[in-house]
Every structure is written in C-alpha cells, then in structure tokens.
Image (cartoon, rainbow, N blue to C red):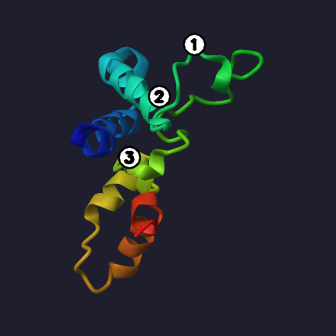
C-alpha cells in the first residue's frame, strides 16, 4: 500500500529525523511514532530507525555508549528515507545550510547536487 511505499519513509521518518536533530529523546518524546516505524520496518525487512534500545543488537557490552546513539542517523536504511540524515544533515548547522540551498541558483548548484547525491533515493535513479 501507499503507506508502506511513501508515508513511512517520506513522512514519519522525516518527523523522527527532525526531532533527533533538535535533541528530542525519541524513546520518550515520540514513542508512539517510533513504535509505528519500528513495527512496520520489521514487516518490510528494513531499518529506517534503530531497533528498540532494549534489544542487545546495538548496545555496547558495558551498557554505556561513547556518545548518544542516534536512532535515525545510525539506521542501516536511512538513505531510503527523506529524513534529513539521508542527505548528510547531522546537526542544526547542517540543517540550516541545507535549507538555504537554492537548487536553481548558479553558485549553489554543486553544493545542492553534493547533498542530494548522498541520498540513497537519488543514487538509485
């Protein structure tokens, strides 16, 4: 259905990616959205966000990470989404620069193409 082919990757994953960039704790602040994405990605055989943090799959042996695990940015199939992280956007500064891109401007064309080519969606075309 369209929900599997569009709304999950190009809707819910964008919300989660933006929330992650803004510093939200997705497990706490967006638990229903995160639950829906995790449940559906399992059915699809994809990893748009990391599995539940209670799973040992992505946890360190000592239970403490060197840094905060990014549920969207570190997901295996994030490049198949429209989340900012799929375009190489990892910080608020990156997001500001990305939003300033003028894909029709002569001076910024190369920069825009560079960001877009990082996306798994564009590279498959």
* Residue 117 in picture, x, y percent from top left: 44, 69
Tell me the element at label 2. Answer: helix
Work out whether mark 2 precedes mark 3 in sequence or the reverse, and give the earlier one: 2
Tell me the element at label 1. Answer: loop
Image check: 97 left or right of 45? left
Measure the alpha-carbon separation of dots 2 and 1.
16 Å
- Camera-near label (2 vs 3) is 2
Residue bearing the label numbered 3 = 92
At x 40%, y 34%, the residue is 20
- 94 and 38: which is toward the camera: 38
* Residue 110 in picture, x, y percent from top left: 40, 80
Q: Which mark is residue 100?
A: none
Tell me the element at label 3. Answer: helix
Residue bearing the label numbered 2 = 42
Image check: 74 left or right of 6? right
Residue 89 visible from this viewpoint: no
At x 34%, y 34%, the residue is 16
Vertical relation: 96 (above or below) 21: below
Work out whether mark 2 precedes mark 1 in sequence or the reverse, and give the earlier one: 2
Residue bearing the label numbered 1 = 54
The answer to which image quadrant residue 116 occupies is bottom left
- Camera-near label (1 vs 3) is 1
- 110 and 94: which is toward the camera: 110
Q: Quadrant of the N terminus?
A: top left
* Residue 28 in picture, x, y percent from top left: 38, 14
At x 35%, y 17%, the residue is 31
Measure the alpha-carbon separation of dots 2 and 3.
29 Å
Work out whether mark 1 precedes mark 3 in sequence or the reverse, and give the earlier one: 1
- 85 and 3: which is toward the camera: 3
* Residue 5 in picture, x, y percent from top left: 30, 45
Measure the alpha-carbon separation of dots 1 and 3.
28 Å
């Amino acid at each position: 259905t369209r929900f599997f082919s569009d709304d999950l990757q190009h809707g819910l994953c964008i919300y989660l990616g933006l929330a992650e960039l803004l510093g939200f704790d997705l497990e706490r602040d967006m638990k229903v959205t995160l639950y829906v994405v995790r449940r559906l990605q399992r059915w699809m055989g994809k990893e748009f966000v990391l599995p539940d943090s209670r799973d040992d799959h992505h946890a360190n042996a000592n239970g403490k990470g060197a840094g905060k695990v990014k549920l969207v940015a570190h997901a295996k199939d994030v490049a198949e989404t429209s989340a900012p992280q799929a375009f190489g956007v990892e910080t608020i500064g990156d997001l500001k620069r990305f939003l300033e891109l003028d894909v029709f401007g002569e001076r910024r064309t190369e920069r825009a193409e560079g960001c877009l080519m990082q996306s798994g969606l564009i590279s498959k075309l």
